[in-house]
Amino acid sequence: MTPEERAQKSAAAMWAGDEASKWAGMEISRVGEGEAVLELTVEAHHCNGHAICHGGVIFMLADSAFAFACNSRNQSTVAQHNMISFIAPGKPGDRLTATAREISLTGRSGIYDIQVTNQDGRQIAEMRGFSRAIKGSLFPEE
């Protein structure tokens, strides 16, 4: 199995059980080894009292992209630590894209950078995720 095929199978296995990302309205645009792109259109129910996208929704989108990137090798992996900086507001109707890419993978620990942009390419947020591999896999390999 190629790394690309493994990443696709890993994403399909995770997506099948990921009710939270589906509930929020996310879609997977692309996955590859150590990378993932997820998208979300900001709806009224994503907005806070300032009529902008709730920071928790933006974090959730970035965190989901991070999860698909760090699980792309069929090794069960969880977040150990994440930090996010909000740069500009997401507005109702915006199409937000979270692009996660692996920076480092050493042993069981990984570092990922996740950029969240809108449909105009404007940067909305930047997150750094630290992952930790745990026991298990997403699907059986022969």
Image: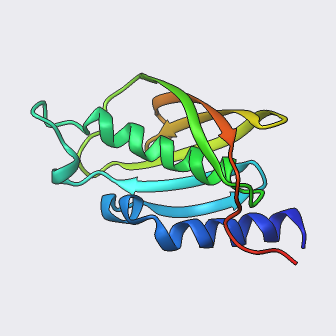
12 relative position to 52: left or right: right
| Position of the C terminus by quadrant | bottom right
* Count of marks placed on residues: 0
Q: Residue at x 40, y 44 (%)?
A: 60
Q: Is residue 104 above or below residue 19?
A: above
Residue 87 position in % (x across, y down): 41, 22
* Residue 27 picture location, percent across and down: 47, 64
Identity of the residue drawn at 31% across and 63% down: 23
Q: Is residue 23 visible?
A: yes
Q: Is residue 19 above or below residue 85?
A: below
User: Can you give x and y, in whole percent of width and height, for residue 134 in the image?
Assistant: 68, 46
Q: Is residue 65 above or below residue 20?
A: above
In the picture provided, is 78 more to the left or to the right than 93?
Answer: right
Colouring style: rainbow
State the residue at coordinates (70%, 52%): 135
Any part of residue 120 in sight: no
Location of residue 19 (image quadrant): bottom left
Q: Tell me the residue at 61%/72% (across/down).
A: 12
- Side of 65 where 19 appears, left or right: left
Q: Is residue 47 left or right of residue 126?
A: left
Question: In this rendering, is residue 55 above or below 46?
Answer: above
Q: Outermost residue, left direction?
A: 49
**Which quadrant holds the N terminus?**
bottom right
Residue 57 x %, y %: 32, 43
Q: Residue furthest bottom?
A: 142
Q: Nearer the viewer, residue 115 or 64?
A: 64
Front-most of residues 9 and 47: 9
